[in-house]
Image (cartoon, rainbow, N blue to C red):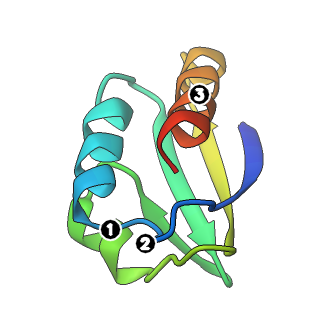
Amino acid sequence: MKEFNYTITDELGIHARPAGLLTKEAKKFSSVCTISKDGQSKKLTQLMMIMSLGVKKGDVVTVQADGTDEDAAIAALKKFFEDNL
């Protein structure tokens, strides 16, 4: 399992548009990808579950990938967060 922590810098946090793009990115990998905030963990392939976390600017999230392509998944997701959130 690989993971990284990220502090959200987007003014609106994780809202519908980036959450949808994040879901598409996570679906490219066979690894199970999750996002965690305040002890709650949700799969990155489930848009409504991501939205239910209510991630706002300044929140720290933990992104994890567990599976055969976890290295590639973490690298791509980290780049996505840096570029979009």
Q: Which image quarter: residue 17?
A: bottom left
Rendered residue at 39%/51% (across/down): 44
- Identified by mark 1, the residue type is His
Residue at the image point whose x is 34% and y is 31% from the top: 25
Residue at 24% x, 60% y is: 47
Q: Which residue is mark 3?
A: 79
Frontmost residue, 80 versus 46: 80
Find residue 12 and name its label.
Answer: 2
| Circle 1 SS class | loop
Please give the residue where the numbered disc 1 appears in the rendered image: 15
Q: Spatial distance from mark 2 to mark 3, Cα to Cα?
A: 19 Å
Judged left or right of residue 66, residue 84 is left
Q: CA distance from mark 1 to mark 2?
A: 6 Å
Answer above or below: position of 57 versus 35: below
For label 3, the SS is helix
**Is the Cβ of the residue at disc 1 closer than 8 Å to that at disc 2?**
yes
Position of residue 8 relative to residue 70, above or below, is below
Q: Amino acid at mark 2?
A: Leu
Q: What residue type is disc 3 on?
A: Lys
Percent position of residue 46, x then y? 26, 58
Tag 2 and tag 3, C-beta contact below 8 Å: no
Quick one: SS at disc 2? loop
In this rendering, position of residue 27 left or right of residue 14: left
Q: Is residue 62 above or below residue 29?
A: below
Q: Earlier in the sequence, mark 3 or mark 1?
A: 1
Residue 38 pos. (x, y %): 67, 84
Residue depicted at x 61% and y 38%: 82
